[in-house]
Image (cartoon, rainbow, N blue to C red):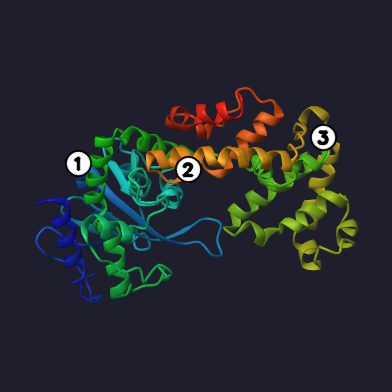
């Protein structure tokens, strides 16, 4: 049976899902049996099977609206014969599944997996691996930069699936029949897709390119950014002196830790505009903070003592404990002119290879290259233009700039 037939049978099976009953619904048709895993002892058995599977398809459904950490509502897993819907709300111990995620002998196949990697990393401490992202793989085969899962299933196998439950409440129970159908279909085609795409990539000699991208994405998801580093995300840092940068660093770190502890979005703790204002006015006493127009009395009551202490401590820090100054960025017009010179080069190489220009070199990469050249950074190529991109486009871009 080929991949097209498998996926069509998967599609027919999942579309026959029954309404929820007690016990949870089970789909049974030939080789496909989507079922709920809602007991710890069942999860242990399923995970023991998954660790012998060689490759599994994974997707997650989560909610992240009023919390710092994503709230997992469902984990979908498939192998060559079965589909499981793991209910994290009913389970007390997800560590058996965490061990599957970090088992290097099991390939994890996902589609557009950056958010899934982040969510699953909270279970494991490190991003799952090894991974295969079907969206990235498809982009190396001319399917566009961000091909959707349903469109890719249609293009590869003629399988039809709906996306009506994208914005569902995945924390509500019981799940609806449509939610179950949607969740199961989101993993049903992943393994057939992986086999089809990997085979085509291998024939084109691009499988190693795709594997570099998978690993780069996994590393990015695993970067352990410390709270003291979050201030570096702030725009316009070159406008602050070292003392102000030290205050920014400490305020950002406090907000990050507070958001984690209370499991609230960062802006629920303190808005960016309030943070900027505190750095500008440097209130060292409660009355100073209360006098600031941007600060509400409720905020002063809740956080005033802590914030003013952070300000006082930052103003007393010795020079050697302050962050280094941030250099002023190059002239935006010069950067823009250089980027305009590089865009046609990227477009030409992308057309020759039949790849999306965004995959060959994203705008942020060529912008970083232009800034590096104007700053005199040596070597100027940013990290993202290394690896397979170095030979495909990196050297060409440097030649276009006379480097």
Q: Which mark is residue 14?
A: none
Q: Is residue 223 visible?
A: no
Q: Is residue 115 left or right of residue 197?
A: right
| Mark toward the start of the polypeptide (1 vs 3) | 1
| Mark toward the start of the polypeptide (2 vs 3) | 2
Q: Is residue 237 above or below residue 170?
A: above
Q: Is residue 74 left or right of residue 41?
A: right
Q: Residue at x 35, y 68 (%)?
A: 163
The image quarter containing residue 333 is: top right
Depth order, front residue of 78/398: 398
Q: Position of residue 31 (x, y in %)?
A: 11, 58
At numbered mark 2, what does the secondary structure look like: helix, strand or loop?
helix
Q: Nearer the viewer, mark 2 or mark 3?
A: 2
At numbered mark 1, what does the secondary structure look like: helix, strand or loop?
loop
At numbered mark 3, what does the secondary structure look like: helix, strand or loop?
loop
Q: Quadrant of the C terminus?
A: top right
Depth order, front residue of 384/228: 384
Q: Position of residue 54 (x, y in %)?
A: 22, 40
Q: Residue at x 29, y 69 (%)?
A: 180
Real-space Cα distance between discs 1 and 2? Answer: 26 Å
- Identify the residue position indicated by label 2 in the image: 221
Q: Which mark is residue 52?
A: 1
């Amino acid at each position: 049976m080929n991949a097209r037939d498998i996926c069509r049978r998967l599609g027919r099976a999942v579309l026959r899902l029954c309404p929820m009953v007690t016990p949870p619904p089970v789909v049974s048709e030939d080789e496909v049996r989507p079922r709920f895993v809602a007991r710890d002892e069942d999860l242990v058995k399923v995970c023991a099977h998954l660790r012998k599977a060689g490759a599994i398809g994974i997707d997650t459904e989560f909610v992240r609206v009023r919390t710092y950490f994503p709230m997992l509502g469902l984990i979908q897993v498939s192998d060559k014969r079965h589909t499981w819907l793991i209910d994290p709300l009913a389970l007390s111990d997800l560590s058996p599944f965490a061990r599957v995620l970090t088992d290097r002998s099991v390939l994890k196949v996902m589609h557009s997996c950056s958010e899934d990697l982040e969510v699953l990393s909270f279970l494991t401490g490190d991003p799952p691996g090894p991974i295969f992202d079907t969206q990235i793989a498809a982009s190396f085969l001319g399917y566009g930069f961000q091909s959707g899962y349903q469109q890719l299933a249609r293009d590869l196998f003629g399988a039809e699936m709906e996306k009506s439950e994208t914005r569902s409440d995945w924390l509500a129970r019981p799940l609806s029949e449509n939610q179950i159908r949607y969740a199961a279909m989101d993993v049903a085609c992943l393994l057939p897709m992986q086999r089809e795409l990997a085979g085509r990539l291998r024939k084109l000699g691009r499988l190693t390119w795709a594997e570099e991208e998978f690993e780069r994405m996994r590393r990015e998801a695993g970067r352990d950014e410390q709270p003291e580093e979050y201030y570096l995300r702030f725009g316009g840092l070159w406008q602050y002196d070292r003392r102000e940068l030290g205050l920014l660093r400490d305020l950002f770190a406090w907000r990050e830790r507070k958001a984690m502890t209370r499991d609230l979005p960062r802006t629920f703790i303190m808005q960016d505009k309030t943070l900027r204002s505190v750095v500008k006015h440097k209130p060292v006493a409660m009355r100073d903070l209360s006098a600031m127009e941007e600060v509400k009395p409720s905020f002063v009551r809740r956080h005033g003592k802590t914030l003013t202490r952070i300000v006082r401590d930052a103003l007393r820090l010795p020079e050697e404990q302050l962050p280094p100054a941030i250099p002023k960025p190059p002239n935006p017009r010069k950067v823009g002119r250089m980027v305009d010179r590089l865009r046609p080069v990227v477009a030409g190489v992308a057309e020759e290879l039949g790849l999306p220009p965004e995959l060959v070199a994203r705008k942020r990469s060529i912008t970083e290259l232009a800034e590096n050249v104007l700053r005199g950074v040596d070597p100027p190529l940013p990290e993202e233009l290394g690896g397979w991109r170095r030979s495909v486009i990196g050297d060409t871009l440097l030649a276009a700039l006379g480097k």
